[in-house]
Image (cartoon, rainbow, N blue to C red):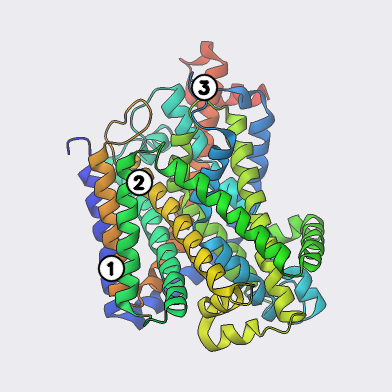
Amino acid sequence: MKNLNYGLALPAIVLVLALLVISSTYPEQSQAMANGAMAFVTTWFGWIVELGSLALVGFLFWLAFSRYGDIQLGEEKPEYSNFSYGGMIFTAGVGASLIYWGIGEPMYYLQSPPLFAEPNSYSAAAWSVTYSIFHWGITGWAIYCFPAIPFAYAFYVQKKRTLKLSTLCASIVGEHPIVAKTIDLLAIFGTLAAFASSLALTVTLLSAGASELLGIENGLLLQGSIILLFVIALLCVMLVGFNQGISKVSDYTVTIAIGFALFVLFSSNSQFILNNFTDSIGVMLDNFFRMSLWTDPVQQSGFPQGWTQYYWFWYYAYLIMMGLFITRISRGRTIREVILYAISMGSLGCTFFISIFGGYAVWAQLIGGFPVQEWMTDGGLTFAVVSLIKTLPAKSAILALFLVIQFFLMLTTMSSASVATAMLTTNELALNGDPDNKVRLLWAGAIALISFSVFLCGGGINTIKSLCVVAGMPMMFIYAILVRHLLLELGAVKSPSNQSEAPELQEATFIQNL
């Protein structure tokens, strides 16, 4: 495969596999080291990630409504309908984790609430769904969205045929080969590690549900069979092609998932869920900036470090996958459309599902008489999620439908990750942004290998999750580099007469003209 950059692909795969093996061989030592590194990152850089992420939200909205928002990314018409476009962004970003954590997070927040509330109190209940919506809302989707703008601008406007992250950073940090390779390997590692963690969670949930539904043993054989099913489905999607594969799977999955959520809403206590949703939105709007910048320096409960900052660093680690995937599907759209669709469709979609499933979990625990927190204590969150789904009417059929939706949500994320890593490691992309089929299939196989290794290596995934968050810290600073790079490039577009000037002078002229 002449078009594959082996110098990036192979070291990244080997690094993830090596970390899995080492962390499973020395589980206590590796987990302690990873936890210490994560604690260091959140302690010393947590305040920066909160300030920087909030600033990024403001920057993107400014960019969308400035004159630069009208810049079209390519001369063609948009390739996908608005529904398909928003659906692909949504499913690629949330995977199967949304409903899982949409149920789990409110339960954790009831037990260990934020902002000095008493456990299982009215205040804790008011914060439970609110904080879940916040963590899956505007800020997270802004972090996901931003890299797509410089990537898409470089590919569709400047006609660059390679989309390595180091290529965009070169205008600021230079073209030193060691620095460039470090940036690219860090980006691929973040994508693979974050994806491996998400897949491990999904397979664990699917195996628990299938075991409950079919009465079979929940073990390595069942988990391996589910991963094999993922691999076969992924190969089919890759061979069918992007438009008939990922796009169609995303459309059907979103449609069925919405229908399933509406069934949960109207077959449970819809009055409570709708009122709780309204109250949660009000609480979040009233406290958005407080929640965005809360570091808890006096009480030191650890809540912002363990939840908000953890989420933000995780999103930064995942940036390349989402940035490149959004780039691939954004040809013909304006910068304004990319920003507003990504942030609105992503955050509104998450709000919709969390409000229903999180609201149902809160009702079940506090009013409905279902011991959701006891289920979590006895069997873990996966057991609690499966048990809660079984409280709905036609429990076996609904559980089966729930598992099918989870499978296809994860398949869409898996497909997106393989496309993104293939784009990142392709030496020269085609005009439509599609990597070679051989490169995509190679990454599908690599992702399958990592997926199998996650379960063969047992507890190594916890170390990978911690290191993934740690990897998000340098990626946060790379965001700052990308912002500066984008400002320089957009300034050059609007001031052609200044293109021969030094980059510093171009940027100064651009800022003066705002």
Disc number lying in front (1 or 2) = 2
Q: Residue 356 at what x, y percent from top left?
A: 69, 63
Residue 453 image label: 1
Q: Alpha carbon of mark 1 to alpha carbon of mark 3: how far?
A: 42 Å
Q: Is residue 57 above or below residue 279?
A: above
Q: Quadrant of residue 70?
A: top right
Q: Residue 61 at what x, y percent from top left?
A: 67, 37
User: What secondary structure is found at the residue carrying circle 1?
Assistant: helix
Question: Is disc 2 surrounded by few (<14), some (14 to 19) or many (20+) residues within 10 Å?
Answer: many
Q: Amino acid at mark 2?
A: Val
Query: Residue at the location (68% across, 25% down)?
Result: 514
Query: Residue at the location (62% across, 27% down)?
Result: 69
Q: Nearer the viewer, residue 162 or 186?
A: 162
Q: Residue 446 at what x, y percent from top left?
A: 26, 55
Circle nearer the N terminus (1, 2): 2
Q: Quadrant of residue 495?
A: top right
Q: Nearer the viewer, residue 78 or 342?
A: 78
Give the residue pinned by disc 3. 77
Circle nearer the N terminus (1, 3): 3
Q: Is residue 512 above or below residue 171?
A: above
